[in-house]
Amino acid sequence: MIASIQTKNQSITRTLQDFFADLLKTGAVDAVLVPSRISKSPYVKPCLITSADQMDQTVPLGPGFFVNAGPMVSRLTRTRADATIGVWLRPCEVRAFVELTKLRQGGRQDVIILSMDCPMALSRKDYEDWAAQGEGGLGDVDKWIHTVYQKPVTKADAWPVARACQVCESPYPVNADVSVMLMGADLDKEIPVRADTEKGEKLLAALDLTDNGQEPAQRKAMLADLTADRTAAFQAMDEEMLVRTGSIDALNRFFSACVNCYNCRSVCPVCYCKECVFNTDAVAYAPAQYLSWADKWGQVPMPNDTVFFHLTRLAHIGCTCVGCGQCTLACPSQIPVADLFISVTRNVRKAFDYVPGRDDAEALPLSVFQESEFTDIVGMGNKEVT
Amino acid sequence: MTQTVMEPSQASPAKNPSLAGDAFEPVLIAFVCNWCTYTAADLAGTSRLTYPDNVRLVRVMCTGMVDPQYVIKAFLEGADAVLVSGCHPGDCHYINGNYKARRRILLLKQILPRFGIDAKRLRLTWIGASDGIEFAQTMTRFVKDIKEIGPCQARLQPVI
């Protein structure tokens, strides 16, 4: 079923705010999780809202993306809550949540996932500049929306979107209950909303929406163009990363500004360990060990294990990185962590024919095995043992 | 221990005899499972078979417990090669640890070459408890292969 929501006051933001308020008023959901401004600052965070009159500070679509809400939904569904929660997620947040459910860190029973063609994100610096130009401390959100969905941008226009977004190949909802199809829509008139599951159908029915809409005529073609652009952008980034990190020396230089703050780990939606090994005694070396390293090379940088940390993280999330770019956003040293992680993981997961977030039923590659598989990687190669 | 203070940029094969040409002596770390490959190593020893002393064995209870980070750490600390070796498929003492190891090695073989660590430096083999001869042969062969490839970059310079 595809319903059409009439645009109010020519404002998509206002229309969506009313849509979420209606979800609460009709009792279709008990709460909604939507990005909202904090104390009228330009920064937005996912907020769990239960009151229909709290919608005016929400920013459902905008270039601000400072928390991947996937783990927040995981928190809300860790145990049963005896309530239905509507969660408004970007496609990469849906992917993150789906990956977490596979790790049994959350479940879909109590949530209804509403997702959208992605409004993309700006880097922190660009976001602050963008926000400063608008009135009321927030940039012109509706202008942003119209730009993004009428003429899909990768790096065009005044504001280059974050690199992770420039190379994202799935900026549309996958695995959601309700998909809001904004790309190519006549947003001054209507927002087409599609129910993808039975839950989604029920939700739209509860709002008295009927099957009177249709997918925007240009949407598929626009998304295909966008995806093609981004595949090309990814290849360019991948090549750049091979040059910038293709050797131990290059890798040292790439991470030379890293101060081991582990922010990238904290914000990573799929860094799933309950206790990270880098917080344990396993890496609390004896003083003599440091001296021994210093003896070996003449010096040892402290803190050390920087590359070890990043490569371990790469191995741990090698198949599940959802490409949201939060690690780059969180890095105080402006290291393009996401560029490296997206490049490597998108190649790594090919070996397992795995795509994070694609399918709930698809098991995490490292959690399963088959008896006869990958036999070519076993042994000493083709030469006979002599 | 001899204290050789060496600037990273000077850490060249010429200054380190164990890294120069024919004299290159690689360091191999082998994670071997208690039930099969370690027992095979034991058998090789009691059978008085010889194999190069470049190999450092790390006994683990199962190849299924070899976290990718053990392998990563070994390489970053200067190992020229890493071998993970356990029971043949179907023989795992813990039923299926070796199958899990196989996927992890596949994962690492996708990641490590991105950073200049040749996939050939990481091997996974199945050597049963009675295969003392195969154990000695595998080690000899692996050391020979790595001597041909040469030292790993992380052996030549420190990793931050």
Image (tube, rainbow, N blue to C red):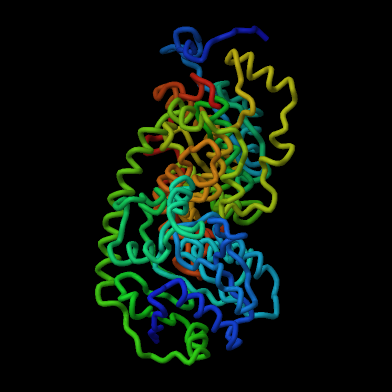
User: Could you tell me residue B97's position as x and y percent?
Assistant: 60, 52
Q: Nearer the viewer, residue A383 or A19?
A: A19
Q: Is residue B30 left or right of residue A341?
A: right
Vertical arrangement, residue B54 with respect to residue A384, above or below: above
Which of the pair A31/A36 is nearer the observer?
A: A36
Most foreground residue, A257 or A96: A257
| Quadrant of the rendered image containing residue A66 | bottom right
The number of discs equals: 0
Q: What's the residue at 61%, 73% (across, down)?
A: A54
Snapshot quadrant of residue B14: top left
The single residue placed furthest to the front in the displayed view is A135
Q: Nearer the viewer, residue A190 or A84?
A: A190
Image location of residue B31, percent across then percent down: 60, 37
The answer to whether one can see residue A110 in this image is no
Quadrant in which the C terminus of chain A appears: top left
Residue A130 in view here: yes
Which residue sits at x=45%, y=55%? A373
In percent of width and height, residue A228 lies at 27, 57
> Residue A113's spot in the image, x, y percent?
52, 74
If the image is split into quadrants, where does the N terminus of chain A sit? bottom left
Residue at image position (57%, 50%) is B98
